[in-house]
Image (spheres, rainbow, N blue to C red):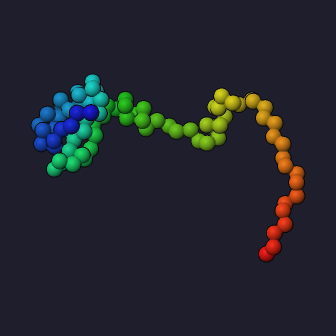
Amino acid sequence: MRRWQLQEAKAKLSLVVKSSQQEGPQEISVRGEPAVVVMAKAEYDRLKGRKLSFVEFLRRSPLVGVKIELERDHTPARRIRL
């Protein structure tokens, strides 16, 4: 990721934008500290994409339809003094 100082990024904004589309995210710093990242819209959309709900996630699992046989332990609970 290329780093730009704010003043340089302001002066060369079109280059920063083109670089973000061709090379990937571009970091802009203010007073030497990282402040923002400029990225291509397509990359942003990919990262922001709709997330599945937990139910949708389980329904899309490759294990859907697999029969799992579980046996429950039927021993009585232990006694404790209160």
- Front residue of 46 and 68: 68
Tell me which residue sits at (81%, 36%) in the image.
Answer: 69
Q: How many marks?
A: 0
- Front residue of 5 and 56: 5
Question: Left or right of 45: which side holds 20?
Answer: left
Question: Left or right of 6: which side holds 65?
Answer: right
Q: State whether residue 18 appears in this view.
A: yes
Task: Identify the image quadrant of residue 28.
Answer: top left
Task: Identify the image quadrant of residue 6.
Answer: top left
Question: Left or right of 59: which side holds 20?
Answer: left
* Residue 78 percent across, percent down from the top left: 84, 62
* Residue 64 percent across, percent down from the top left: 71, 31
Looking at the rendered image, the quarter that the C terminus falls into is bottom right
Looking at the rendered image, the quarter that the N terminus falls into is top left
Tell me which residue sits at (26%, 44%) in the image.
Answer: 36
Q: State whether residue 10 appears in this view.
A: no
Tell me which residue sits at (43%, 38%) in the image.
Answer: 48
